[in-house]
Image: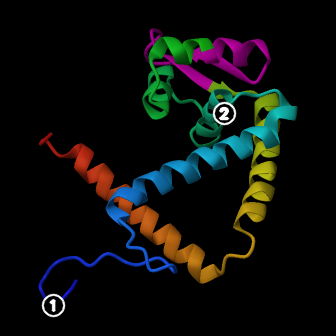
Amino acid sequence: MSPSGKTTMPKSPAGITIDWELRLGFLIHDVSRLRRSAFDRSVKVLNVTRSQWWVLAYLSRDDGMTQSQLAEELDLGKVAVGGLLDRLERTGLVRRAADSSDRRVNRVFLEPKGKALVARLRKISQEHNDEILAGLSEEALEVTATTLNAIKHSLIKKLQSTEP
């Protein structure tokens, strides 16, 4: 902040003022999109779509989720998740089973083939991260992670508030 109380804009190495309030959103979006595209390219040989590996990733953290929980976590409609699960079941990666206490509810479980695929995806992800983060110091990574985590929690808090 300047002595007048106004927020001062940082300058780029060329001396150009950077509007971080505008630019930050674009940077986060671009990095996320490019990272996903690069990862998609890395896993193309496994014949798994991004949507499918997201389902597998969520199940690897919470195997036995209900189909409704998966839809909510993935921010997809129940019909879309149903279609994804149909394809994953046909390839032997997941199975659906009725909930033991409520037969109307389907739970989704990773099959051994799905667990093996998740292990391969994690290995590729680690190699992918090693490559794209090469050259960044541990301190820079910690600051970045801390900053993004703070932004994430601020967004969650904003979305949970009752005000529009």
Q: Amino acid at mark 2?
A: Leu
Magenta segment, which residues? 84-108
Counting residues from the start of the chain, the first of labels 1 and 2 encountered is 1
Residue lying at the far bottom in this picture: please name it: 3
Q: CA distance from mark 1 to mark 2?
A: 53 Å
* Residue closest to the eye, 61 or 24: 24
Q: Residue at x 42, y 74 (%)?
A: 16
Residue 3 bears which disc, if any?
1
**151 or 23, which is in the foreground?**
23
Q: Quadrant of the N terminus?
A: bottom left
The amino acid at mark 1 is: Pro
Q: Which mark is residue 163?
A: none
Element marked by disc 2: helix
Q: Position of residue 107 (x, y in %)?
A: 55, 22
Please identify the quarter of the rendering in which residue 132 is found: bottom right
Q: Residue at x 59, y 73 (%)?
A: 141
Point out the frontmost of discs 1 and 2.
1
Mark 1 vs 2: CB contact within 8 A: no
Which mark is drawn over residue 56?
2
| Left or right of residue 161, residue 159 in this image | right
Q: Is residue 95 above or below residue 124?
A: above
Task: Name the spot of residue 135 as percent of width and height, x first.
Answer: 73, 76
Q: Secondary structure at mark 1?
A: loop
Q: Is residue 116 magenta?
A: no
The C terminus, quarter of image:
top left
Q: Is 96 situated left or right of 13 in this image? A: right
Of 160 and 18, nearer the camera is: 18
- Residue 63 horizontal/vertical position (percent): 60, 35
User: Crowding near pointer 1: few (<14 within 10 Å), some, many (20+)?
Assistant: few
